[in-house]
Amino acid sequence: MQALPSHIQTDKNGYLLDSSQWNIEIAKIMAELETIDMTNDHWEVIDYVRQFYNEFQKSPSIRPLVKYLAKSLGKEKGNSLYLQILFPEGPAKQATKIAGLPKPARCI
């Protein structure tokens, strides 16, 4: 299993302290650390999580994420079951971590 480069700092929960250090390679390592094999569906969600953050300046918790994805991608992908299958330890938690964003405020 690959580790993050030593210059990449995270908080105690593994979220990047500086989101400007994020890139695809960092995301791949973070996904591996979360034991997630990234597919096109995962990357699509990551892209939309980053778009949400850029639009609203905060990481989405699960309910806003589901609504945002349903509006953008349709109800098939904008539902909590679909997201839970992709990110079994918590869709908002894992997707924002892999996307290099801060932990959502409402994530436990």
Image (cartoon, helix red, strand yellow):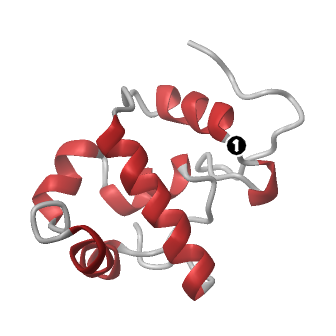
Q: Is residue 6 left or right of residue 31?
A: right
* Residue at image point 49% right, 76% down: 52
Residue 63 percent coordinates (x, y): 27, 79
* Residue at image point 18% right, 60% down: 77
* Residue at image point 20% right, 52% down: 84
Whether 19 is drawn above or below 6: the answer is below
The residue under label 1 is which amino acid type?
Answer: Asn
Q: Residue 75: in sight, yes or no?
A: yes
Residue 91 percent coordinates (x, y): 32, 56
Q: Quadrant of residue 25?
A: top right
As drawn, the residue found furthest toward the bottom would be 56
Residue 21 percent coordinates (x, y): 80, 49
Residue labelled with disc 1: 23
| Quarter that holds the C terminus | bottom left
Q: Quadrant of residue 24?
A: top right
Q: Is residue 39 left or right of residue 10?
A: left
Residue closest to the eye, 38 or 104: 38
Mark 1 residue crowding within 10 angstroms, few (<14) / some (14–19) / many (20+): few
As drawn, the residue found furthest toward the front would be 73
As drawn, the residue found furthest toward the top would be 1
Q: Residue 88: in sight, yes or no?
A: no
